[in-house]
Image (cartoon, rainbow, N blue to C red):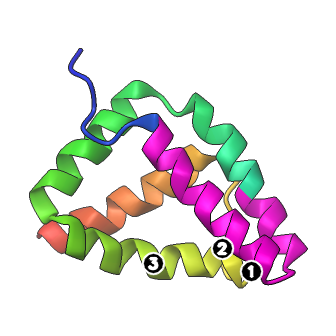
Amino acid sequence: MAKPSVSREAFRGLFAFYAAKAHHDHNGVAEGRLLKLFASSEHIPDGLLELWSSRTELIGPEAVGNIMAPLTHQILDGGAQYNHASDFLHRLLRELDRDLH
């Protein structure tokens, strides 16, 4: 199996970054949600990470950022909750697929 161009650690870093921001902003609820996703991202299936990698290469970093930022902010403001990082990644993939078509 080919190594995904977006590593598990890089994807985990997304949750760590936003959790640190939530901590700085004294938003313990959002921080807790993001830390839960950070911990569960260790168990994202490799196939899902490979799919994520291929989609992000097709659409480009700017478009990915435009899709990812609002979804991440929904977690911060309580508008969305995910039980596992894979759930969040599936949501991102659906949004990326819409943007590709």
Q: Which residue is the extreme one toward the front?
A: 24
Q: Between marks 1 and 3, how big is the CA–CA gap?
A: 14 Å
Q: Position of residue 3 (x, y in %)?
A: 26, 24
Task: Residue under label 2, please give it.
Answer: 75
Measured along the vertical axis of the image, is residue 29 above or below residue 48?
A: below
Q: Between marks 1 and 2, how big is the CA–CA gap?
A: 5 Å
Task: Residue under label 3, please give it.
Answer: 69
Measured along the vertical axis of the image, is residue 33 above or below residue 101?
A: above
Considering the numbered disc 2 on the image, is that residue within a helix, a strand or a loop?
helix
Considering the numbered disc 1 on the image, is that residue within a helix, a strand or a loop?
loop
Say if residue 14 shows up in the picture: yes
Task: Residue under label 1, please give it.
Answer: 78
Which portion, as a residue range, is magenta?
9-34
Instruction: Give yes or no for contact between labels 1 and 2 (Cβ–Cβ under 8 Å).
Output: yes
Q: Which residue is the extreme one toward the top?
A: 1
Tell which of 34 and 78 is nearer to you.
34
Measured along the vertical axis of the image, is residue 83 above or below residue 43?
A: below
**For this view, does 12 lie left or right of residue 60?**
right
Q: Between marks 3 and 2, how big is the CA–CA gap?
A: 10 Å
Query: Where, quadrant-wise, is the N terminus in this rendering?
Result: top left
